[in-house]
Amino acid sequence: MIELALGDVLPWLRSRLASAMKPLRREWERLRRDARKALDEVRGACDRIREEGEKCVSDRDHRKHRPGRAALRFHKMMSGVLASVSLPEDLSTEAIAELQRNLARVYNAIGREWSGLLRQMEPYMIRARMKLKGVWRKLGDIVRELDGLAAKCRPLELEDEVAAHVSRVERTKSQLEEVEAELGALSVEKREAEQSLAELLKAKEVLESSEAIRRLREAEEVVEHLSMQVRTELRHAWKGLVKLRSSSEAGVLSLEPGEAEALAAYISNPARALAEDEDGYPKLLALLARLEEAIERGSVRLKAKKVEKFRAWLEKARSGGLSELQARCRKAVGELDALRSSEEVLEALRRLEELEREISELRKKTEMLGGRIDSLHAKRERLRRKLAEEISALEALLTDITGEEVRVAVEKGG
């Protein structure tokens, strides 16, 4: 078994094919020389036809004018065809095909005119036309010999085929290396982002356990607990108050701006609303009075038992039953507001907000990087499979050409 690096495949193959190529290169050089000589002879014959055509055109015998003009048109046409002809140098299947096309274009251009311009020259320019016919036939022979050479050039075709396989492998390998490089860079970036995120979360944890934030959270919990107590105390009126707001928003009944604002405050934050109400909570009592009126008018509908409980509780509320709870709410809300306005807590909250913003941005970044990395992992696997398939196809082709088992080593990324 022969083991080859990818870069050594073509030099190794060319060395194996060198002995088979020597006679083909000799034949190619001979055919190129024959083609050059034949083209020169075609040019010579065409120049001779032009010279004789000019003489015919200038002759006093008008019978010679038409053949002379045909000769000049033929020369002009062939000059254009011959000017576009080139002779490839290095032997390749493409070079053989190109030379065949060039010679065939000249051969066919002449062949079409045997029944056209060349026939119009009769009975003049006989020797020039005979010379042209001879070299024309020689061109046909060369075209046919090039066919034979192309048939013998299977090694060249195989070399081209191997070169195409090698190119595909190199391209896939390059793509895989690009993916590996991007994966490496993104993995480093993701690790750094995760490390920064962990540090920020730790800083947030430390800040949240600080004395200032701890006292703030305790004060917030007290207010939240009192809000639950206020709502519990208002339980017999709560559903009615919610329906009162819905009816107001639907236009079934109207509330004064101050009443609507107080109602929204009591529903959203009961403890603060009660604390900020005046002594004896007149705003709440006004709302309860509007609710009682709405129930009587049918603008707000409640079950009879709920209405009965509401009215019984309303007497308690009107007689100052919520005053003690209001005092506790004022004390708790006041302490909370004092904490929130202190320099220490304001600075802690500012830093906490900044940390949360940075944490949010880093989480989004790590998620984005994770998604891109997952996509690249999938692409890498596809490219690895593709590379393995292309290497296997190249090895099979080399084995088929040389009859020896060949293994191609390709350094793979990752």
Image (tube, rainbow, N blue to C red):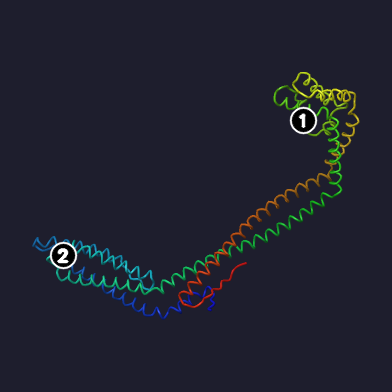
Extreme residue toward the bottom, this view: 19
Circle number at residue 19 = none
Query: Residue 81 appears at what percent x and percent y?
Result: 27, 64
- Dot 2 or dot 1: first in sequence order is 2
In the image, what residue occupies the spot 86% across and 43% down? 218
Amino acid at the residue labelled 2: Glu
SS class, disc 1: helix
**Distance from Cα at disc 2 to Cα at disc 1:** 112 Å
Q: Quarter of the image containing the C terminus? A: bottom right
Which one is in front, 371 or 216? 371
- Above or below, 152 against 64 in this view is below
Amino acid at the residue labelled 1: Ala
In the picture, measured across the screen, residue 256 lies left or right of residue 396, that is right
In the image, what residue occupies the spot 90% across and 27% down? 321
Q: Which of marks 2 and 1 is in front?
A: 1
Which one is in front, 240 or 271? 240
SS class, disc 2: helix
In the picture, measured across the screen, residue 359 lies left or right of residue 105, that is right
Circle number at residue 264 = 1
In the picture, measured across the screen, residue 6 lies left or right of residue 252, that is left
- Above or below, 141 against 331 in this view is below
Disc 2 residue crowd, few under 14, some 14–19, many 20+, Cα 10 Å: some
Query: Residue 64 appears at what percent x and percent y?
Result: 11, 63
- Above or below, 117 against 212 in this view is below
Extreme residue toward the top, this view: 297
- Above or below, 221 against 28 in this view is above
Disc 1 residue crowd, few under 14, some 14–19, many 20+, Cα 10 Å: some
Q: Give the residue number, with chain letter if any, for mark 2.
A: 54
**Residue 196: which quarter of the image?**
bottom right
**Residue 388: which quarter of the image?**
bottom right
**Residue 70: which quarter of the image?**
bottom left
Query: Residue 132 appears at what percent x and percent y?
Result: 20, 70
